[in-house]
Amino acid sequence: MDRKEEILRLIEEGYRTAKELARHFNVSLMTIYRDLKDLEEEGLIVRRHGNIELKKDQEIREDTCAVCGKDVDLRLAFIYILKGGKKVHACCAHCGLILVKGLDRDRIEVALTRDFITCNPINAFGAFYVVGGSASPCCSPSAVAFADRETAEKFAKGFGGDVVSFDDAVLKMEDLMKGGQRVDITI
């Protein structure tokens, strides 16, 4: 069995980092990174935030963000319910606003998030967002959802950022992320 096949087997058994794999094989991190790059290009693995997963494990899960791979905290969660009942989860408004670009908007039946202050569920399409403020409860650049414009404006007064509607928040987030890394969403 060659090293790449063994790497796939070890990932399936629970190895999640390049450091763990390098220790197991007693090779340098660069050697493992080359192998991981090849496996990723072959579509067999996905690397996110230092963790490695088999591609088949990358199914949409309710406890993992479809954009960044973080655990979903229900107080900040952003959920798209697609026709047919399939749910796509994001960890926060930042990722939820990015995620909509990877979805067929006509397939979205409902988009839910929570008001940042009250934690009450709200319609994400009708919410007001403070984008680009200094308060960053999850991912950055910051995006925080509110049920009403008045509360969003008060929040922005204290933490900065622009108060915008859903569609404008998507565009604003896109502008803020242009200098960053491209995010590919597989659904």
Image: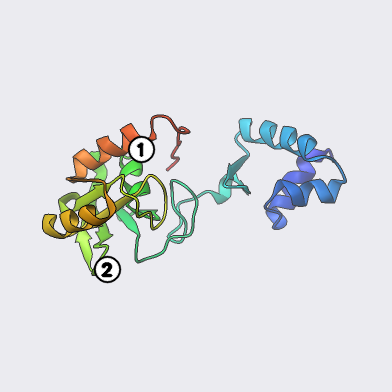
Q: Is residue 83 above or below residue 181?
A: below
Question: Do tag 2 and tag 1 residues touch (Cβ < 8 Å)?
Answer: no
Report the disc number at residue 154.
none
Count every numbered label the image shows and give the total. Answer: 2
Between 8 and 19, the one nearer to me in the picture: 19
Q: Which residue is mark 1?
A: 102
**In front of the other: 162 or 113:** 162
- Residue at point 37%, 47% (across, down): 95
**Label 2, on which residue?**
119
- How crowded pointer 1 is (Cα within 10 Å; few <14, some 14-19, many 20+) is rated as some
Q: Where residue 91 sits in the image (x, y, percent)?
A: 40, 55
Residue ranking furthest to the right: 26
* Quarter placement of the C terminus: top left
Q: Secondary structure at mark 1?
A: helix
Asked where in the image residue 28 lies, by quadrant, the reply is top right
Sequence order check: which comes first, mark 2 or mark 1? 1
Q: CA distance from mark 2 to mark 1?
A: 26 Å
Q: Is residue 140 left or right of residue 16?
A: left
Residue 44 can be seen in this image: yes
**Quadrant position of the N terminus in the picture:** top right
Callout 2, which amino acid? Answer: Cys
Residue 105 location (% of width, % of height): 24, 40
